[in-house]
């Protein structure tokens, strides 16, 4: 294992970017494979197809042929497990810690420990709310608030297109893990967007924990409580797949009787759109392995990186799903 940084970590902010002092000289040896850069990845879990694709993206990028040794930890959607993983990475004296935080808050202590040990922390996918922004080096991921807003804009346009723009519309919301930035941003974007249109009524919102089984269970309870649901927002594809099963079991036609909008846009979502069961999937791109690799390589070469790095994302429905399906890698 190679230790890039001394005991005192020098974070220097240079013209809007960040640079780590002292790391550049070790890059070549690592690339030669005899002195690998050790990266600990504290992953959320394996709750969704998106997460599986994200894990695969890291596992296939952080390989010895690319100059890395990856220590991977699956926290099973529990913050306490991620905190344990980060402490273990610190003990193992890794070169970089990468975290996809389960929830936004409660990280100051453990990130303070990483900082004291001189180990830079890169956030990926979800964000943290921290009192001290210097506790992490940078973040790369999707813009969850924008995703939420885009989903309501899509609904507005779709209802206009099918001649229902002036009808009262009843909405239910399947939320992700409460307190995760994916849930917080999407929920905010959706609820603010819905509030702008007096035709929309949000009947209920409940977490489905980003899993298919829980999404199905919660949708079943929504269908029992309300017989007049027009629209479901599911804060990820897998909860939408669960909702589709629940809607079918209730004798309704998903995509027709109830409009379904989801987030992620994994390959299976394209199949469901083409089958007419899902109306819209807002993209959340999981392929962060190469992005984090680029950040580390830039730092190793003595370069600077932007603190906040948003990924470009699209939106898919029946107008483009068939054409784009062959290009979906996950
Ligand atoms: O943080 C990204 C979200 O986490 C994805 O939308 C979801 O599928 C995953 O579990």
Image (cartoon, rainbow, N blue to C red):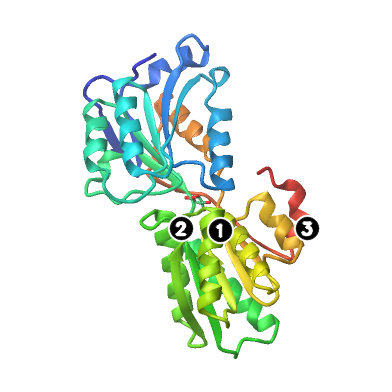
**CA gap, disc 1 and disc 2:** 9 Å
Q: Position of residue 131 (x, y in %)?
A: 22, 49
Residue lying at the far top in this picture: please name it.
34
- First in residue order: circle 3 vs circle 1: 1
Where disc 2 sits, the SS reads: loop
Q: Provide the residue designation for mark 2.
A: 176
Is 253 in front, or is 58? 253
Numbered disc in front, either 3 or 1: 1
Is label 3 in a helix, a strand or a loop?
helix
Left or right: residue 52 versus residue 177 is right
SS of the residue at dot 1?
helix
Please tell me which residue is depicted at 57% across the width and 41% down the height of the picture.
Answer: 52
Query: Mark 3 near ligand 1 (CB under 8 Å)?
Result: no
From the image, tell me which residue sits under label 3. Answer: 322
Tag 3 near tag 1, CB within 8 Å? no
Q: Which residue is mark 1?
A: 239
Is any part of residue 272 visible from this angle?
Answer: yes
Q: Residue at x 52, y 12 (%)?
A: 33
* Tag 1 and tag 2, C-beta contact below 8 Å: yes
First of labels 3, 2 by sequence position: 2
Q: Is residue 230 above or below residue 313?
A: below
Q: Nearer the viewer, residue 303 or 142?
A: 142
Q: Which is more N-terminal, label 2 or label 1?
A: 2
Q: Residue at x 63, y 73 (%)?
A: 259
Q: Is mark 2 within 8 Å of ligand 1?
A: yes
Q: Please tell me whether mark 3 or mark 2 is closer to you in this view.
A: 2
| Percent x, y of residue 227 | 57, 81
């Amino acid at each position: 294992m190679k230790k890039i940084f001394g005991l005192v970590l020098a974070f220097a902010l240079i013209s809007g970017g960040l640079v780590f002092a002292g790391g550049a000289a070790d890059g070549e040896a690592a690339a030669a494979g005899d002195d690998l850069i050790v990266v600990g990845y504290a992953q959320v879990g394996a709750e969704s197809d998106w997460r599986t694709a994200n894990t695969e993206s890291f596992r296939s990028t952080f390989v010895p042929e690319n100059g890395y040794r990856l220590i991977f930890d699956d926290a099973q959607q529990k913050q306490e497990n991620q905190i344990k993983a980060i402490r273990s990475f610190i003990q193992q004296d890794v070169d970089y810690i990468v975290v996809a935080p389960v929830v936004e808050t409660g990280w100051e202590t453990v990130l303070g420990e990483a900082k004291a040990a001189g180990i830079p922390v890169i956030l990926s996918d979800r964000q943290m709310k921290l009192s001290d922004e210097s506790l992490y080096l940078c973040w790369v991921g999707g813009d969850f608030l924008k995703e939420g807003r885009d989903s309501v804009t899509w609904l507005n346009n779709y209802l206009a297109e099918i001649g229902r723009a002036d009808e009262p519309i009843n909405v239910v919301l399947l939320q992700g893990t409460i307190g995760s930035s994916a849930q917080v941003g999407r929920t905010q974007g959706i609820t603010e967007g819905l509030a702008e249109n007096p035709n929309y009524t949000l009947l209920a919102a409940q977490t489905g924990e980003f899993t298919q089984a829980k999404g199905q269970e919660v949708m079943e309870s929504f269908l029992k409580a309300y017989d007049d649901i027009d629209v479901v927002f599911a804060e990820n594809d897998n909860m939408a797949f669960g909702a589709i099963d629940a809607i079918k079991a209730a004798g309704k036609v998903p995509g027709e009787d109830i409009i379904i909008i989801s987030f992620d846009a994994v390959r299976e979502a394209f199949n469901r759109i083409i089958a007419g069961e899902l109306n819209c999937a807002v993209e959340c791109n999981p392929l962060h392995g190469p992005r984090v690799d680029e950040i580390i390589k830039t730092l190793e070469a003595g370069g600077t990186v932007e603190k906040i790095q948003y990924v470009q994302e699209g939106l898919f429905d029946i107008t483009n799903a068939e054409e784009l399906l062959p290009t979906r890698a996950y």
